[in-house]
Image (cartoon, coloured by chain):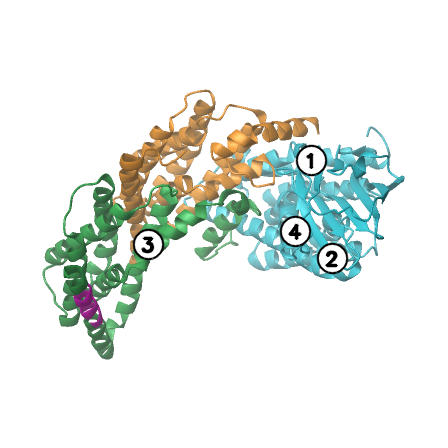
Amino acid sequence: MKLSRSPSVAPLLAAFAALVPVQAEAHILKGEAVGFVSGFLHPISGADHVIAMVAVGLWGAQLGQPAIWLLPVTFPLIMAVGGFLGLVGFPLPGSEIAIALSGVCLGAAVLLELRPPLWVAAALVGMFGLFHGYAHGSELPPGQNALLYSLGFVMATGLLHATGIAIGTVHRWPWGRIVLRGAGGVVLSGGLMFLWSALT
Amino acid sequence: MRAFLAACLFAWLGFSAAPVCAHEVRPAYLEIDQTGQATYRVIWKLPTMGDMAIHLVPHLSNGWLEQPPADQFVAPGFLVRRWDIRTTPSASLSGQTVAIEGLADTMTDVFVRVRLPRGQQTDAVIRPEQPYFRIDLANGRALGLPTFLLLGIEHILTGPDHLLFVLGLLLIVRDRWSLIKTISAFTLAHSITLAAATFGAIQLPTAMLNASIALSILFLAPEVVRAQRGGTSYTIRHPWVVAFAFGLLHGMGFASGLASLGLERSALLGALVLFNVGVELGQLAFIVLVLALLRSFRLMELRWPRPIAQSPVYVIGILGAYWTFQYGALTFGIGA
Amino acid sequence: MKGRLTALVVTALVLPQAAEAHLVVSGMGPLYDGISHFGLSPEDFLPVIAFGLFAGLCGKAQARWSLLAFVPSWIAGGVAAMAGVALAPMSISIVTAAIFLIVGGLLALNRALPPAWSAGVAALLGALRGLADLSGIAASAAHGLALAGMALGGFVLFALAVSITLPLQRLWMIVAARVGGSWLAALGLLLVGWVVRYGPVIH
């Protein structure tokens, strides 16, 4: 069978074309798309979350293998654990401060190009992830389509990591490393600002 | 390997074909024209096949259509009814509801066009899921061109006859170059006749056209079997010639989905182009899907048992033969 | 013609409750309603795609057996549901979340299972999904057609997902697939929390 050595996007396209029929969306997505969109917007609407998520990606890119893929695989899970705790109402005090602190710490790590042992980095990122997830989880509004809202939420978080990692690819060039450290500085100052407003 | 087209396609085509005797998705058409200050003309075109018509009855909530029509006649492929309404100048169409009795039981759409003297116009498509439409002249807008794109996609994806023919072609072609040539020839040919038939340059009676299309499917089945057994023939060596020749017929079939809309010539060209693009998109999606599935089977070294592997060809052959007899009989007025 | 009309009348009659039970209405007949089901219901297409990606990462034999195990068990689950073995919304929500966790976790971990095991998980996934999808829907002619369409949609989606990961060699693409699995598991975890707090999430 010689034909059809199609690139691997073809199956995706085909799946899409085949499974999304012509006028279906009008019937099914009424109101449900709203759930997805609001879930998607939630993680990216708070600047304190955004800079921390992007910083995770930046730091992962600086640390290189295996952190660069270990972080995006484990981080969503830890965040979901935090979200779970937030949803069920588990008390976890001081999450506002922890979130602002995460911006400060991750920003500093990227600025100084810190290279702790992998488990230390993972534990640090994981702990902050827990707090971020917790904050989101306790804010999740009832009455949304839970599945689509959560889906949008997880995807937005993952894409913020991916953005950080994509920016982090400049790390291979000497000038890129400086740019990256500069970005760490931006995250650090942002974190400090949020820390200030959380404390006062 | 190409033969391992598998149960899925078999099921798809088999199931979509089985309950659909006719590929009868031609829409009905209702036009309400304000001809004077207090006069209206209503035209209702109901698609027919041979002596059969689906049971669709239009109603207006102000009761205009409950009186007997002023005129009623049979046009090729259609039953046409006309009402001439005299009313008071204060009567307004706005806020009235058009309901189509029987539509919920069909797969057909109804196009509604309301025209007022000052060029004001409202178009709508009524579908079986919601067989009524409230006329709102204040917020009326012309039927968006994308509707025709969707109509084209829908037309090919719900037409097992066209899909079976394309599947047969896919099963015959040997390599990528031949695939491209064959599909391009089919596309070119049906685009030509789609345009020609839409503008009324060519015309075939519906039953005869459907019989010829069925014959093209029947013709392909033995060729696929021959190709799978390693044999050769003119069709197998030059599938694009066959694709072009029969594509001319299939194009006239596509035209049936569009010709009945009663569009004005000025609007027809844009609608035609979009409808055609929609048909090509649907066809392309089908081809990509078939090829991607074949690639997946090849990658996982999935070998179907012989009866399953050959079932698509037999579905093509059996349905081709069935439709040929069915429409052949209609063409000559037998059975019906 | 008569059979088709009957089927359509039946669809029209069951449409209101069918919509509640999350049967998609494509406007193109019950077969396409079924086909589009797997494309428009995240609780179905997410785990099927994820498990297809996982089976593809495991290897050819696993992919093959999983694919062949998935579809019949999905149909069996669906038929059982229509015959009256229905799940309550609460159970459906929990099953959905559990499936997300298990399938997403498998993909994120990317540890190859033996073919028999992966086929077993595929069969379990299929049976549970079939049961959840068609709970609360009584059997009818139109549903038979929709069921066939749904099975077909699931089969195609599974096969296509397999064909994405089966030939993968590059590390970053495998990582991307695993990240997807981790997202799905995270989604499952969030849904569990949601169920605990607000009750059933899938109706």
Q: What residue is shown with label 3?
A: A42
Name chain B's colour.
cyan
Dots 1 and 2 on the same chain: yes
Q: Gap between marks 2 and 3, in whole Å?
A: 44 Å
Q: Position of residue B72 (x, y in %)?
A: 88, 39
Q: Residue furthest bottom?
A: A175
Q: Compare residues B287 and B278 and report the one nearer the observer.
A: B278
The label nearer to you, 1 versus 2, is 2
- The local secondary structure at tag 4 comes to helix
- The local secondary structure at tag 2 comes to loop
Give residue B120's mark.
2
Q: Chain of mark 1?
A: B
Identify the residue at horizontal 51%, vertical 41% (top origin): C36
Q: What residue is shown with label 1?
A: B103
Chain identifier matching the orange colour in the rendered picture = C
The label nearer to you, 4 versus 1, is 1
Does B130 sit above or below residue B94? above
Image-based side of C107 in relation to B192, left or right = left
In magenta, the rendered stretch is A186-194
Q: What residue is shown with label 4?
A: B152
- The local secondary structure at tag 1 comes to helix
Name chain A's colour.
green
Given the image, on which type of amino acid does mark 2 rest? Answer: Gln
Give residue A143's mark.
none
